[in-house]
Amino acid sequence: MVGAPTEHTHGDKERITGELPARLRLLPAGRLSVLSTEQFLHLSHQVMEPAAASPLPPPPPRTKPSNMLLLLPLLLLAASLAPHGSSADGLRYDYKAYTECKGHPEPALYNGGILRWAKKIKDFRTADEGNYSPSFVLYNMSAGMAYSFSCWVKFNGPGTIHVKAKILSLDNAGSQCLGTALVRNDCWSFLKGGFTLNSPSQTSVLYFQAATANASMVSIRSASLQPFSPEQWSQHREDRIQLIRKRFVNVHVSDISGGRVVGAKVAVRQMSRDFPFGSAISKTILGNKPYQDWFRKRFNAAVFENELKWYATEPAPGKEDYALADQLLQFVQSSDAVARGHNIFWEDPKYTPWWVKNLTSADQLRAAVAGRIESLLSRYKGDFVHWDVSNEMLHFDFYESRLGRNATTDFFRTAKRADPLATLFLNDFNVVEVCDDLSSSADSYVSRLRQLADAGVTFEGIGLEAHFGKPNIPYVRAVLDKLGTLRLPIWLTEVDISNALDPKTQAAYLEEVLREGFAHPSVDGIMLWTAMDASAACYQMCLTDGNFTNLPAGDVVDRLLGEWQTREVLGATNDRGSFNFSAFLGEYKLSVTYLNSSAEGTFSLARSDDTKHITIRLQP
C-alpha cells in the first residue's frame, strides 16, 4: 500500500453542528435548538409514531428498594424457566446480507431486535446537510455492547445516492456513522452496519442521512437493532472458528484382521497451517538472520512492502531492476511461505513513477503500461499467488483518467493472460476501517466490481487494506458480511493500528481486528503491514523492537498464532478402537503404537463440514 506515510481519513465521529447543543429540539421546520431531556421526551411523544404495537414509555423512574425485592423472586423464576443457553450464548449473530437491490424488502433480522419497542420520528432533521427521516428514539443504550443494525432503504428521488445510518447521543450531541448503502428509487437496498458506544446514553436517535441536501424522502423497512454483550460477541467468534477453521477427526485403529484395537496410543502433530497469516517484509530482511528466523518462526505468507512497485522496479524508462524483488522472493520460497504480488499499478499519482507521469500522449502511456505487465508477470509467472492489479482505484484514477474507463479492464485481461494461475485482486483502504468514506463503502466496492465484470473482467479476490485508527468491530463484521455475498476470496491485506495510540491500546485494537478477521467465514487470509526498516521503524505498527523483542502488538500476534494451531494431540483409542479430536486445518503427522506394533502417516485437514475419518491398520 505505502512506500511513505499516506494520509488516510480514519475519523469515525462527527458533530451535528459547529457549536453543539446539549439537547436537540424538533421543530416543524426541522431545525435544532437547546432542549432539556424532559422537554425532548415530552415533545418527541407528540411527533412520534410507533414502530410496533408496543408503545415506548419515557425512561422509567428508579425502582424503589421495596419494589425491587418484590421483583427479584419473579426474575429468578424467569431465569430458572429460560431454556439452557438462552442468555450468554443463546442469541446467535446473523451473517445474512444482500448486495442486490430487491423489489421487496426481506424480513427484519432478529425480528427487529430492540427496534420493536422503539418509536419512529416522522420528521427529524439536523443543521448539517441531508435528509433524516424516519428516525428511531432509543433509551438507555449501554457502553461496551456490540449493536448490529440492518434495514432496507429506498428513496423517491432520481438516480442513485448514498444513505448513511447514524446514531446520535443526546447526552453529548455526538453522532457516529454505523452503516451505508447505495440507494435507488426503483428497488430496496440492504444497509447493514453496527457500532459500540464509548459511554452509556440515556437517550439516542438512530437516523438516516442522504448524501445530497436535495434528496427526497428516505423510506425504511425491516429495520433491526440487536445488542450483543461482549461475551456473546466473543462466543460467536469462537463458534465460527470451530466451524470454519477447525475440523473433527476420527482415527480408527484396527489389527491386521480388521479387529478394533483398544488402548492404542495416538500422537498427532501439526506440520503446517492452512490459513495464510503473514507480514509485509522489505529489503532489510535480506542478510539479516535474526530477522529471517523471527519471520520464519511465525508466518506462512509474505508481501513486499515496496520492492515490486513500479517506481522500484523501473525507476527510469527502460532501466529495470528486479534484484531486490528476486532476493525477497527467494527468501519467501525458502521459508515455505506464499507471496502476494503488490502491486502492478497504483492509481495514486503520488506513487506513480515520475517518468510515467511525464508521458505526453495516451499512446506512450499505453505502451508503458503494456510493457510493465509483460515484464513483471513474465518474470514472475507462477511465483505469486495473488496480484493486486489496480491498487486504490476506488480513491484515485491516474490511469483511467488518461487511458479511458476501460483501462482497468485491459489491465486485468492482460494480467490474466500473462499469469493464468494467479488470483487477481482489487485492493483499497477505508472499506472496513471507517463508515464515512463513501468512495470505498462496501456498496461502492461492489458497484465497481460489477462495472468491471460487465466489461468482461472475471474477478477473483477482494483486498481490504485494514489500516485502522479505532476499529468499529460490529461495522467491520457487517461489511465483511456484505462483501462475502459475492463468494470471492477476501483478504485483509495490510493490517495495522495507528501509532498515534499508546502501545497497549494499539495491541488491544489489533487483537480485536485479528480475531474478527480470523473468525469470519469470508476471510481467506490476513497480512500485517509490519515491515521493519533499517532504523527499526514501521509504517504505523511494529511487532518488535530492533532486537526482535516483542512489543505489545507482537505479544498479541504470538498469542493468537499459538491459539490458532494444534501443536500436538495425544490420546488412546476407546472401546470402539477410535480416537476423536478437533484440530485446526492444515497438514499433520500421525503416529500410532500398540504393544510391538506401530504405524505412521500424514493427512491433510481442508475446510469441510464433514468429520475426517482416518483408518490405521497395524502390522505385527
Image (spheres, grey):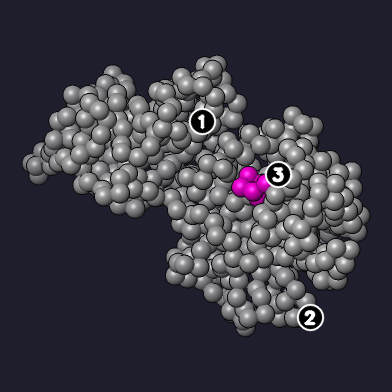
Task: Specify the quadrant that holds the N terminus.
Answer: bottom right
Instruction: State which tag comes first along the sequence, 1 or 3.
Output: 1
- For label 3, the residue is 401
Relative image position of residue 363 (x, y in whole percent): 85, 46
Please identify the quarter of the rendering in which residue 378 is found.
bottom right
Q: Callout 3: few (<14), some (14-19), or many (20+) C-alpha neighbours within 10 Å?
A: few
Q: Callout 2: few (<14), some (14-19), or many (20+) C-alpha neighbours within 10 Å?
A: few
Please identify the quarter of the rendering in which residue 91 is found.
top left
Image position of 60 with respect to 390: above or below: above
Side (left or right) of 612 relative to 34: right
Is residue 264 among the parts visible in the rendering?
Answer: no
- For label 2, the residue is 287
Q: Which residues are magenta?
A: 391-397
**Is 233 contained in the magenta span?**
no
Image position of 282 with respect to 126: above or below: below
Q: Nearer the viewer, mark 1 or mark 2?
A: 1
- For label 1, the residue is 161
What is the spatial separation of the Cα atoms under label 1 and label 2, in whole angstroms? 53 Å
Image position of 222 with respect to 479: above or below: above
Q: Residue at x 66, y 37 (%)?
A: 448
